[in-house]
Image (tube, rainbow, N blue to C red):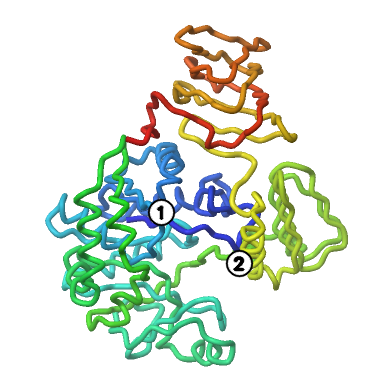
Amino acid sequence: MILCGGTGTRLWPLSRSTYPKQYWNLIGENNQTLLQQTQERLKGINEVNQPIFICHEDHRFIVAEQIRQINVEANSIVLEPTGRNTAPAIAIAALQALKQDNDPLLLVLAADHEIRDIDKFHNTINASKSYAEEGRLVTFGIVPTGPETGYGYIEAIEPLNPNKLTGIDIARFVEKPNKETAEKFLKDKRFTWNSGMFLFKASAVINELTKYEPDLISYCKTSLEQGKTDLDFLRLNKTSFEKCPNLAIDVAVMEKTSLGTVLPLNAGWSDVGSWKTLWETEDKTSDGNVIKGNVISESSNNCYLRSENRLLVGIGLEKIVAIETDDAVLISNIEDTQKVKEIVKTLERQGAPQGKAHRKIYRPWGNFTSVVEGTRWQVKKIEVNPGARLSLQMHHHRAEHWVVVKGTALVEKDNEKKLLKENQSTYIPLGCKHRLSNPGKLPVELIEVQSGDYLGEDDIVRFEDIYGRIEK
């Protein structure tokens, strides 16, 4: 199972709640997202079945599209109506796996990690199978490379040998330590970083959850039993799932169980948790810089410079992070990037849209980008994927003008259909029942001009929708 939750706020302004870090290409040169890389690195491990993805319902079409791009068919894409940490998510996946198989091993991975040495990763997974088959709850301890205070630690009952893939019983879990304690842990081979990756029998983790968190298991079972299939997704029952305790699997089970086993993982792991982490793990220029996108660097050293759109120029910089997006720019000392999370909280308190969403918003049919807006009007660029179509809808508060700038669009207005080609336009009056489709094999791009007394995205009344977005 691949856990796709989390908002990755420390990687703002790129990662935001509507499009978090696991869905971005942040590392490597293959243009794959972190989610896609997580799935792809499983190639070469024997007997890996189709994956179960657990994600927030708002991200369902992003997950579906990204796994389609790498030709992966999911066992399930399970939709959480709200975030409830890793214990409920793992419980749901284990229950789902038991419905479909005879007590399989469940490999739990996060969608937002980097692992550089794939062979070592595979060897460690393969070495852990025998322990999991015996009923042990296996986790993978990352061999520390420094006195890290941003990670939790796992203490084994005896020293671990990074070159010997032997499982050792777990003595305890330790929360993020201070610098002095972390330095002591670094010298003690019993301690490893807590990776949040696991391997266990589905029945084994369910049994331990039932023992230590019976209410959680009860609510998860009910939310799964009362869930509904929605297109390619499994939508959990909201009422039951929201009653689940908000617990990490470490707190719910691993800190209490006597079945915990840890294996050392020394495979170039990173949780891709901050801009500093990305700078540390990525390949650098001779000046120690990581350069991404449309960037010119002159006399700058040890910087992370990334541009998504406009030209970014850095001159005479030292240990600076500079991130450009279409609506926000971050400039920070590389040592202070952990504080970005607090800036996001401030933006959210202020109601600033940059705290949660990008100007480019993804939808199951494509995307739209806000270009410019006034008091009673705004302009958007809309892109519709081949074969896709928007819902049949109407608006109470706004009218729209559409101008096709690329491709051919099929426009439906009050039951009348018309093809529009490049440089052709149409007007959608307030209250008109309408729909936009792309009948071709290339994306359709158009400019939409909205005008009215209210321009919010919630001013949509849907009558038909192939993506199941009509409340029943």
The dot on residue 41 is: 1
Q: Is residue 160 visible?
A: yes
Q: Nearer the viewer, residue 319 or 407?
A: 407
Whether label 2 touches label 1, CB < 8 Å: no
**x, y percent for residue 446:** 63, 21
Report whether 20 appears left or right of 301: left
The dot on residue 169 is: none
Q: Looking at the rendering, which quadrant does residue 207 occupy?
A: bottom left
Q: Nearer the viewer, residue 371 or 208?
A: 371
For the N terminus, which image quadrant? bottom left
| Sooner in the amino-acid sequence: mark 2 or mark 1 | 1
**x, y percent for residue 333:** 75, 69
Q: Is residue 396 above or below residue 153?
A: above
Q: CA distance from mark 2 to mark 1?
A: 21 Å
Report whether 236 appears left or right of 394: left
Q: Is residue 111 above or below residue 280?
A: above
- Which amino acid type is shown beneath numbered disc 2? Thr
**x, y percent for residue 408:** 56, 13
Check disc 2 and report the residue beneath it. 277
Q: Secondary structure at mark 1?
A: loop
For the C terminus, which image quadrant? top left
Report whether 40 appears left or right of 335: left
- Which amino acid type is shown beneath numbered disc 1? Arg
Question: How many residues crowd mark 2 within 10 Å: few (<14), some (14–19), many (20+)?
Answer: some
Q: Is residue 172 above or below residue 40?
A: below
